[in-house]
Image: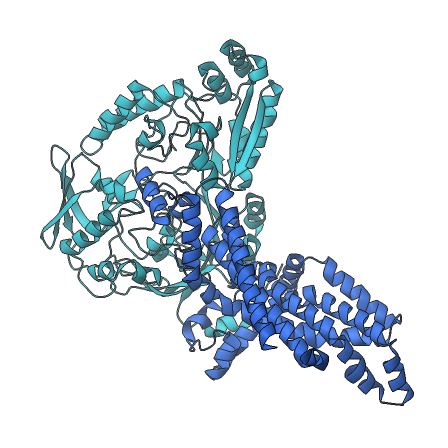
Amino acid sequence: MTRYVVQRLILMVGTLIGVLTVTFVLTHILPGSPVEMMLGHKPTPDQIAAAKHQLGLDLPLWEQYLRFLGEIGRGHFGNSFLTSQPVIQDISQRLMATVELTTLAMISIILIGVPIGVLSAVKANSPIDHFVRSLSVAGVALPGFMLGMLLQMAFYGWLGWLPLQGRMTSTILLDHSFPRVTGLYLIDSLLAHDPIAFRDAAAHIVLPLITLTLANLPLVARTTRNLMVEALTEDYVRTAFAYGLPRRDVYFRYALKATLIPLLTVIGLTYGYLLGGAVVAEYVFDWPGIGSYVVRAITQSDYPAAVGVTLFLAAAYLTINLIVDLLYFLVDPRLRRA
Amino acid sequence: MSARTFAFQASAARAYTLTVVDGIDVKDWDPAIAYGHESYVLNNIYDPLTRYNTKEAKLEPALATSWSVSDDGLTWTFKLRSGVKFHSGAPMTAGAIKIMLDRNIKMGQGAHYLWGNAEVSAPDDSTLVLKTKDPLPLDLVSSASYAAMIYSPAAAAAGNAWFQKGNADGTGPYKLVQWIPNQQIVLERNADYWGGWKGDEADRIIVRIVAEASTQLQMLRSGEADMTFATIPFDMIAGLQQDPNLKVEIVDSWQYLPAPINVKLAPTDNLKFRQALTHMVDYETISKQLYAGLASVPQGPTPMAMPGAIVYDMPKFDLALAKQLLDESGVPKDQWKITWVAYGGVDVLKNIALLFQADAAKLGVQVQIVQGDWGVVWDKQKHLETSVNVFPYRNWPDYATIQPASMLQTQDDKSRSFNLGYYSNADVDKEIDDGTKLEAVDKAKCYAAWQAAYKQAITDAASLYIADTKRIIAHRSNLEGVTTDPAYETVFFRFLHRTNA
């Protein structure tokens, strides 16, 4: 297993260098120069020349590439044109907001999606199954931004029950300065015994969480259903039923266990997608995470930020995949012996 | 839609707080570098030496109470207001301003060039002397939105990294107390503000950063926000105007839309062809329809609100005349093809391009619309081989000046900034130089020289002048004191107050 992990880590480095090369080439073949974006609306020619020199844009391309690899290797992603802050600092400031939202969404997806999938498979072709499948299709078909805006209209505009946007109410953010231990507001406010801040943070996360969950739930629910339908036709399941084992045990201890490897793969992919794909929910709800950051970076040609987030997401995706692969060893004893 | 205010918000609001919503966060907190949208916040934290009053077309005292210039226009002396303190408590003195100006000039960023490498001295605490090699209007430069905000020596010593963490130390009416990137900026009333307080102003101003326009307006409608400083899509304005709880202010701006015509690129290297283009722009439709009435037809090459602006004989929309000029140009009909930029996905610029394309097609002129990000298209335009024929872009001056040098004076490719039509005329160059030498000492003669330069450029059809645009600020009806000046892209927060506060 150790050998396998080392092999995967080496492969990860290779993949990341590939991603680096592609992003470098892409940002350098695009027309125009980033310095005009960096310097504001009326830079003088001297300022432009100085900025080009400072960024190394006056060097030969191969030298720029080596410099780029060196800088990334040292953790220097450059400064964002839009925020003037180091990209790594921007990402770290926003990372936990995304982690809080996506992790809760992932937990919700698993807790709701898997049981729904099992139920749908057990009651295959029944009205319950048809209802779940229709709901899944609707969930996939309804774009995230539309769902988010509908939720805003209903719960903020009409009912006034939940906040419209952001991670916390302005005044609470100002007056309740609880220590940011983890960067996860729900946990930090609990650690600080600040119920007002906790309640406010919880209220703010509800709508983006529902949006993200409903948009990604169908994949997990449908995958679970399809895998379970297949598993329930296996001989060992029929045998278990024949032995008179309780149905719940057969469904969850035998049939579901057999679906875990492909299901883990889907869940891992979904989480990776959520990290990078929370863009729409974050933008609609002004959730100050990586997603809304990358939207601004792309729409306003903030290359260092776009490259930084691309690399970060690639690394996160590869790490999640590695963790999923390692979980296979836990789930399937045959792999441990192989 | 009847929206109820989110319950938790009210319970937490203790101080008298006003909430302003904006779509863009502050990029540069360092006043030596800031050269963009952030000036709307910084202008409430920092003061300049002088302040320009556009309505009365005059300079007013701010941190300087009086100023004078030597006869040769090379030495400016500012007398400073006494007893003013920075937010940190340090005194505002001539020595402090010298440190700040020296830093701005040495850093060479933002709009530092406005000061022309001035040599700064402080003979005593209340006297500031600036000497320049060429005569510069430093009284006007001192009122600029950029590079003229006065900050403390401690802030200057702490440097850019300190500013960029969301710190500030000015003399203005509000202090910066919190910045959470991409979420909110919180300003608190400076009780010791030298301008004084009436008593009904806000204790705190919270600027919420909200990217999505529809979300900004929902916050405004529900009362969660008192005002929006963000750009409101034109198609949403009519809806806002019908809401009795809201008020939409349409205020003058120094922003306008020139479109240099490339005099080095065929077929616009032909004078008659360029003149024809100036009659193919449907100015009225652009202002009334495409800008939804939030722009006016230019009466000159600079907006009328600017000092030194006069009415010129501007070309009118006249397709018959345009056709006649096209025929007279001698350009073969199969070469009646031009390229036109519409950058940055800005809807109104694209719509203007489409309208022009449709009108030009009636005369047999083909218009190819070139799109791209501002940085990209601007960079390309500065190289003749990648340039287009017509390049509309939004423009505004750094301070109260109609100085035409950046747009009309001859520039080589290395120094090219905004002469994006490659225009070059020796007489115009001379008029611009003559005016520039006089701006500090004799504004009337200076403006006369520059007006002559503009007049010649209009005759040469060096540029289209498409629209003079306005700024829109929407706020709750119970918010009063929404005070603006085109010289400053901001709302002065110290005048704001809620009528039921």
Total labels drawn: 0
Observer-nearest of B137 and B390:
B390
Q: Quadrant of the N terminus of chain A?
A: bottom right
Report if residue B174 is visible in the image. no
Observer-nearest of B128 and B114:
B114
Image quadrant where residue B172 sits:
bottom left
In x, y percent, where is residue B204?
38, 65
Q: Please, which residue is most extreme toward the left here? A: B123
Report if residue B165 is visible in the image. yes
Q: In the rendered image of this protein, does residue B422 appear above or below residue B110?
A: above
Q: Chain B rendered in what hue?
A: cyan
The residue under the point 41% across, 30% down is B420
Left or right of A100, for residue A151: right
Q: Quadrant of the C terminus of chain A?
A: bottom right
Name the image colouring: by chain
In x, y percent, where is residue B11?
48, 74
Q: Please, which residue is most extreme toward the right here? A: A242
The residue under the point 25% across, 62% down is B158
In x, y percent, where is residue B133?
16, 36
In x, y percent, where is residue B418?
38, 33
Image quadrant where residue B371 sits:
top right
Observer-nearest of B277 and B83:
B277
Q: Chain A rendered in what hue?
A: blue
The residue under the point 45% across, 18% down is B269
Observer-nearest of B411 and B393:
B411
Left or right of B146, for residue A100: right
Left or right of A32, for residue B42: left
The residue under the point 57% across, 64% down is A11
Q: In the rendered image of this protein, does residue A124 appear above or below residue A19?
A: below
